[in-house]
Image (cartoon, grey):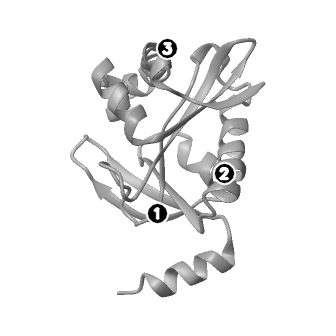
Amino acid sequence: MIFRQITQADSELYLNLIHDAYQSVEQMGIHFAAATADLDTIKKHIDSNGVYAVQKSGKVMSTLSIRFPWGNNPGPYGLPHLGWFATDPEHKGEGFGRLLMEWVERSILIEQLKLPAVTLGTAESHPWLIKVYKQHGYREIGQANLGHGHTTIYLEKVLDQGRYEDWQKRNKK
């Protein structure tokens, strides 16, 4: 397996994977922006975010993006925010998403960016995602109605307790 960053050269491949992966979520009546992204949106997303993939035998199996607080679509809590998490539906349940998330957390968020914590959001009505994120160390920290037909539940994972405590002290208003 290879873990790598998605580039503009991967735009069409990334678009197809995102659409395929989010099709089942759309069928549940849950509308995420990634599900209807066009090629121009995909290219802007790659330019503005850290987009990572795991591939096996030359095929991208799963992708995950990091939105940055200083970017054009920051997360709601002043921390990097994970999103556009997608796994090829033909390989759903094979652990590629879990492996990618663990690699991104360890190699990018902790070792490279030295983050105190990270956030993500998902639809309250999704039948299993909140439970899965909680099993991987995330905890609920808030919710919002963003006008997409569902309530978004925000979750946070502390990656380094000491850095997190320091970050909290600096960010008290």
Q: Quadrant of the N terminus?
A: top right
Upstream in sequence: badge 1 or badge 3: 3
Circle 3 — which element? helix
Q: Amino acid at mark 3?
A: Leu
Upstream in sequence: badge 3 or badge 2: 3
Q: Amino acid at mark 2?
A: Glu
Instruction: Using the image as rendered, state which of residue 151 and residue 62 is in the foreground.
Output: 62
Q: Amino acid at mark 1?
A: Leu
Residue 173's x, y, as percent?
34, 87
- The residue shown at (50%, 81%) is 168
Q: Is residue 109 left or right of residue 11?
A: right
Asked whether disc 1 touches disc 2, contact meaning CB atoms under 8 Å apart, the reply is no
Residue 19's x, y, as percent?
42, 19
Report which quarter residue 112 is drawn in: bottom right
Residue 39's x, y, as percent?
32, 18
Q: Which mark is residue 13?
A: 3
Upstream in sequence: badge 1 or badge 2: 1
Q: Marks 1/2: CA distance?
A: 13 Å
Residue 77's x, y, as percent?
40, 66
- Above or below, 109 against 51 in this view is below
The extreme left residue here reads: 147
Circle 1 — which element? loop
Circle 2 — which element? helix
- Above or below, 91 against 68 in this view is above
Residue hosting label 2? 105
Q: Which mark is residue 79?
A: 1
- The residue shown at (67%, 58%) is 110
Q: Is residue 29 visible?
A: no
Instruction: Using the image as rendered, state which of residue 44 and residue 65 is in the foreground.
Output: 44
Q: Is residue 81 visible?
A: yes
